[in-house]
């Protein structure tokens, strides 16, 4: 078995090397899936490469590979033994009803067997809707590209998604945020074993939580932050959004303080442990490497479980802190358009869901809009 080659990045873009490396990992995964799929989809691969985000491209390709494996193992629609060998003629024979059976029957619950384990996989409607979208975009492209004779997409059954309800959005209340930040500052609510670890990481953990609830960053956006992402003299820092979009965020005193404390009291003490690959990473593990997505998620669940009064594994995910930031900012009086811009929501209707969390908003509006003078009424 050959030794993997060292990855060397020649980066002439404005993106930091770690962001480029992460994107390269996703591209490599996409290329591996493409090699496993039928050759007649090649033009479709080019289409995805130039029209959607890398993460979306990877999700679409994975769904399509899953469908191709289903055709081989669960149907008589192909004689191929590998997805790569499925022919265009066989794909031309696929009907809308075959897609509907795949989504409505097989995907709702299926079994995955490995050597020592038999797992039952159950999908909810949101997962089914994504698989439907992946197949719809493929079949629509192949029809438009004149590879398929018929457009079967219109015959695919709709998948009803529950309308998002503001009251169902999970997030911390403002007072619960205070309890969470007090826990990371003082160690209150932690077990004795957790406090041993907390003593070494409390400034780092606090900086992570404060940044999450201030800006509502996505997990990947926070995990990719570097020391050189921050320009303290200008009072700003740079993040990279979905589709590699660069965004400059303003710094406030609270964020500057927690980052300064972390660098001064913790990160500087372990800088000799940091690997050359991760020397620019902002948030470092005790082992000297960039914190992983998994480690950050576990950290957030731990500290959010304290104000919620629940088990650690029942704590909120980083995405719930994104929802917390959105609803808190709106409660403080910022407009939905300001919050939309800060959180990088594609559609303002997403942000409007959080505005419904503002307590007694209707009561406050009407109470502040008295048309009659009380004293005048009494005199009359």
Image (cartoon, rainbow, N blue to C red):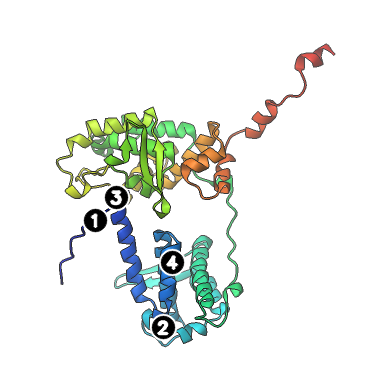
Residue 86 is labelled as 2
Marks 2 and 1, the one that precedes in the sequence: 1
Horizontal relation, residue 174 to residue 4: left or right: right
Residue lying furthest top in this view?
Answer: 379
Instruction: Indicate which label's residue lies in the foreground, 3 or 1.
Output: 1
- The residue labelled by disc 3 is 292
Q: Report, in whole angstroms, how far the alpha carbon at label 3 lies from the one at label 1.
A: 24 Å
Q: Report, in whole angstroms, how far the alpha carbon at label 4 lies from the one at label 1.
A: 25 Å
Q: Report, in whole angstroms, how far the alpha carbon at label 2 lies from the one at label 1.
A: 38 Å
Q: Secondary structure at mark 3?
A: loop
Q: Which residue is rendered at x = 38% and y = 76% of the image?
A: 37
Marks 4 and 1, the one that precedes in the sequence: 1
Crowd rating for badge 2 (residues with CA inside 10 Å; few <14, some 14–19, many 20+): many
Horizontal relation, residue 12 to residue 2: left or right: right
Instruction: Indicate which label's residue lies in the foreground, 2 or 4.
Output: 4
Query: Residue 38, relative to residue 281: is it above or below?
Result: below
- The residue labelled by disc 4 is 48
């Amino acid at each position: 078995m050959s030794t993997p080659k060292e990855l060397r990045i020649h980066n002439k873009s404005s993106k930091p090397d770690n962001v480029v490396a992460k994107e390269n990992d996703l591209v490599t995964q996409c290329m591996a899936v493409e090699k496993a799929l039928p050759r007649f989809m090649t033009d479709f691969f080019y289409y995805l490469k130039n029209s959607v985000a890398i993460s979306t491209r990877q999700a679409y390709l994975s769904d399509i590979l899953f469908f191709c494996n289903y055709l081989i193992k669960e149907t008589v629609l192909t004689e191929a033994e590998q997805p790569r060998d499925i022919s265009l003629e066989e794909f031309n024979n696929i009907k809308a009803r075959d897609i509907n059976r795949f989504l409505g029957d097989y995907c709702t619950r299926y079994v995955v067997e490995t050597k020592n384990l038999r797992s039952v996989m159950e999908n909810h409607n949101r997962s089914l809707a994504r698989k439907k979208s992946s197949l719809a975009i493929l079949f629509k492209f192949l029809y438009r590209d004149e590879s398929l004779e018929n457009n079967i997409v219109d015959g695919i059954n709709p998948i009803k998604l529950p309308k998002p309800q503001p009251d169902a959005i999970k997030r911390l209340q403002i007072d619960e945020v205070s309890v969470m930040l007090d826990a990371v500052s003082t160690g209150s609510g932690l077990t004795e074993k957790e406090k041993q670890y907390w003593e070494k990481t409390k400034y780092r953990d606090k900086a992570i939580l404060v940044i999450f609830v201030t800006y509502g960053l996505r997990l990947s956006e926070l995990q990719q932050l570097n020391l050189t992402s921050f320009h303290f003299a200008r009072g700003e820092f740079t993040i990279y959004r979905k589709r590699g979009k660069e965004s400059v965020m303003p710094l406030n005193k609270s964020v500057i303080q927690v980052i300064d404390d972390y660098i001064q009291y913790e990160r500087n003490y372990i800088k000799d442990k940091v690997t050359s690959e991760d020397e620019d990473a902002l948030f470092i593990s005790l082992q000297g490497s960039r914190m992983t997505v998994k480690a950050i998620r576990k950290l957030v669940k731990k500290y959010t479980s304290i104000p919620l009064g629940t088990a650690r594994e029942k704590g909120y995910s980083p995405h719930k802190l994104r929802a917390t930031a959105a609803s808190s900012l709106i409660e403080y009086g910022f407009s939905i358009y300001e919050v939309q811009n800060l959180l990088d929501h594609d559609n303002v209707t997403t942000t409007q869901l959080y505005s419904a969390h503002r307590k007694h908003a209707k009561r406050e509006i009407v109470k502040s809009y008295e048309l009659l003078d009380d004293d005048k009424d009494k005199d009359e």
